[in-house]
Image (spheres, helix red, strand yellow):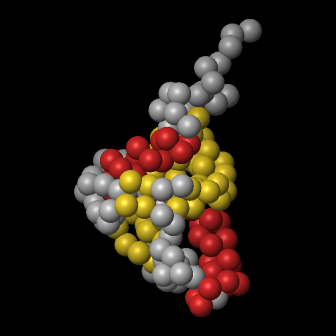
Amino acid sequence: MSARPPNESPDSRPRVDVAVGILQRRLDGQVLLAQRPAGKPYAGWWEFPGGKLERGESVEQALARELNEELGILVGPSSPYDAVEYDYPHAQVRLHFRLITDWQGEPRSREGQALIWQHPGAIEVAPLLPASIPVIDRLATQCRGAGASSRR
C-alpha cells in the first residue's frame, strides 16, 4: 500500500486549501467581489478575493498575504465565517471564508481583475463561482435580519 501525499485526493485531482476574504463595509454592508482574470480556471467568474495557502501558512497569514498582493490592502483582524468544500473539475477545494471589516488602504486591482462592491442581497454580477453562492446567501440573510440601521 502506498501513501498518498496530503494534498492529493483519491481520484488524483489536487486538494487545495484556499483563504477567502469577505471584505464587508460597515457603513452599508456591501461586500467586495473580484472577477477571475484570464488564464486562471473559471476566468470571468466572480468570487471573493483570496488565494491558496502556501506550505506552513495559517489561513490568516495566507489571507493577509493574498489580499495585500491582489488588492494592496493591509487587513486587520478577521473572523472565521464558514468553511466550504467544493468539488471542481480541476481540484477538490476547501475554502476558508473569513469576515473582514477592518483594513487599511482602498482595495484596488493589482492583478488585472475587475472589482465591484455589491450588497449580498442584491448581487448583480454573474456568473458567481458555485462555492461562493451559499456564503452570499447566508450573508444576505444576516443583513436582512440585522437591518441597515444596525451597521456602523
Left or right side of 89 for 80: right
- Residue closer to the observer: 144 or 75: 75
Residue under the point 35% across and 56% down: 73
36 and 50: which is toward the camera = 50
| Residue with the most extreme bottom position | 149
Most foreground residue, 14 or 148: 148
Residue 142 sits above or below residue 11 on the image: below
Write the residue at 56% across / 42% down.
Answer: 59
Of residues 122 and 29, which is closer to you in this image?
29
State whether residue 68 is above or below residue 33.
Answer: above
Residue 66 shown left or right of residue 132 in the figure:
left
Q: Residue at x 48, y 64 (%)?
A: 102
Mark yes or no: residue 111 visible. yes
Total numbered labels: 0
Q: Residue 20 location in percent, x, y?
A: 52, 53
Instruction: Give the image location of residue 129, x and y in percent.
Output: 51, 60
Image quadrant in which you'd find residue 112: bottom left
Instruction: Tell me if I can see residue 46 in this picture.
Output: no
Q: Residue furthest right?
A: 1
In-image side of 140 versus 21 (left or right): right
Q: Position of residue 58 (x, y in %)?
A: 56, 37
Q: In the image, residue 12 lies at what x, y percent? A: 59, 28
Residue in the picture at 37% in, 61% down: 104
Query: Quick one: quadrant of the N terminus?
Result: top right
